Amino acid sequence: MAASENDRVGSVETRGIEPVPDAERHGHASQMFWTWFAANISILGLPLGAALVSFRGLNIWQAAVVAILGSFGSFALVGALSIAGKRGGAPALTLSRAVFGVRGNAGPTLVTWMSRLGWETINTTTAAFALLALLDAAFGIRRNTVLTVVCLLVFIGCTLLISGLGHATIMWINRWASYVFGLLNLVVIGFLATTVDWGKVFHAPVGPVSSMVVGVGMIAAGTGIGWANTGADYARYLPRRIPGGRLVAASAFGAGIPLVVLISLGSLLAAGEPDLASASDPVSAINTMLPSWMSIPYLIAAFGGLLLSNHLSVYSAGLTMITLGIRVRRTLAVGLDVVVTFAGGIYFILITKDFYGPFITFLTLLAVPITAWVGVFAVDLILRRSYDGAALMDVGRSSRYWFRGGVAWAAMIAWAAAIVVGLLFTEASTSATDVWFSGPLAHSWIGSNGLGWVVTLVLAAVVHALLRRLDGTVREEASEQPPQQQVLPAPAARELS
């Protein structure tokens, strides 16, 4: 089926969060392959692999197995949750209204938006550092305040252009940029491989199986879990007839292939550079391992990889902002998003001297409610067969998803309970002496090995599955059949949103 005028490469996507009608659906499952390949070809995957060796004591073969299980497994989950987008034609957090209620959904949506803004700020500041280093290496231009602001604006401008144009342009850019930046990464990877201390690699002792279990969780939490609530945003234009299994496979292989290569290489490099795993600025840390002539292609690859990841995040953040109730067009939502990240970049680069530690600590805490949302949403997806397009856009009492007081209490209780328990196993700190938050079970085996997110995910799913059967309003909604062709045209839907 041909693309509609609303979703053509180079034209501005005017659709916001309203569901995509069947007549405008087009594309193939392979689009999800390129989406997640592009998001994961950044050299920044190397420190993850280094951590498996430096912190978990695994050898290269164990690290490779962990990388395969963690990367492919977590993005298989991303692909599975993206099936909701194919079914309902709407972004993930908009579909979440059917799970939590039109009012109850505000909590998960706000947390998701804050988390997206946070990681975009990290991407923006890191990319600015990469561009500053590139200018220094290529032209000998030293860093100063004006140049720093210019570098931030360049990255923000590139992000705004791609994310502002919307879905079709993003899909096109993902595919072709993957070839360009993927090739650059292969060149850098090939050179880095020659610096590996192969003697240490092949004589490294075998690590405990328990460390492999923890490593799988660490890789999953650092890769796919962070994208799990965005998959539907990119699958919503796909025809309903595409089998869900193809979305799962395309997502898993699209992200898994580059991640396994990068994580495995990071494990190899850690034999000679154990500090790589704990570097606060991994771009600079890896750059020091390269000769000056290799710095330029490396820094271009690093900048491009961050851009490919960031424009996906900004696009989703714009849709999440609209779902939250901010009544603006999608393009303006994207613009507001990048303004906030630009301000954050200015603050973190020019005003504060140490931002990575405190900021990532804050984002670690936000990961707990996001993981709980994944558990609740996954159960609903398994049990649900359809979404009512008009009801998704109706946030009043007449909405099918009003439930009781605008809240689906089975989902809300499961979400809240999982957050509380997840925090029990969580410690957020910038160092051993700077602990922001420490749950009473943070130093148990589960907590100290970073597996609290697994407990959060499983508990949210189990509690929601049990309570869903007891919630009369949810049973009533599930028994109704949505009327045919309830998808509203874009202008009318924007009024309701």
Image (cartoon, rainbow, N blue to C red):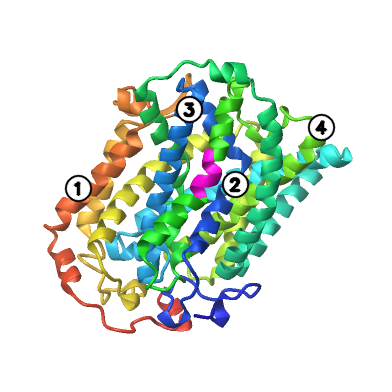
Where residue 411 is drawn, which disc sits there? none
Q: As shown in the figure, which amino acid type bears the numbered disc 2?
A: Ile
Q: Nearer the viewer, mark 3 or mark 2?
A: 3
> Which is nearer the N-term, disc 4 or disc 3?
3
Q: Position of residue 54 (x, y in %)?
A: 52, 21
Where residue 61 is drawn, which disc sits there? 3
In the image, the segment drawn in magenta is 255-260
Q: Nearer the viewer, mark 2 or mark 1?
A: 2
Q: Which image quadrant: the C terminus?
A: bottom left
Q: Nearer the viewer, mark 1 or mark 3?
A: 3
Q: Which residue is mark 4?
A: 292
> Which is nearer the N-term, disc 2 or disc 1?
2
* Vertical placement of residue 165 versus 42, above or below: below
Secondary element type, mark 2: loop
> Which is nearer the N-term, disc 4 or disc 1?
4
* Vertical placement of residue 362 versus 108, above or below: above
> Which is nearer the N-term, disc 2 or disc 4?
2
Is residue 325 visible in the rendered structure shown here?
Answer: no
The CA distance from mark 1 to mark 3 is 37 Å
Q: Residues within 10 Å of mark 3 (few under 14, many from 20)?
A: some
- Viewer-closest of 27 and 372: 27
Q: Position of residue 488 (x, y in %)?
A: 40, 82
Secondary element type, mark 4: helix
Q: Position of residue 366 (x, y in %)?
A: 42, 43
> Which is nearer the N-term, disc 3 or disc 2?
2
The CA distance from mark 3 to mark 2 is 21 Å
Q: Which residue is mark 2?
A: 41
The CA distance from mark 4 to mark 3 is 31 Å
Left or right: 385, with 57 as reference point: left
Q: As shown in the figure, which amino acid type bears the numbered disc 4?
A: Ser
The CA distance from mark 2 to mark 1 is 36 Å
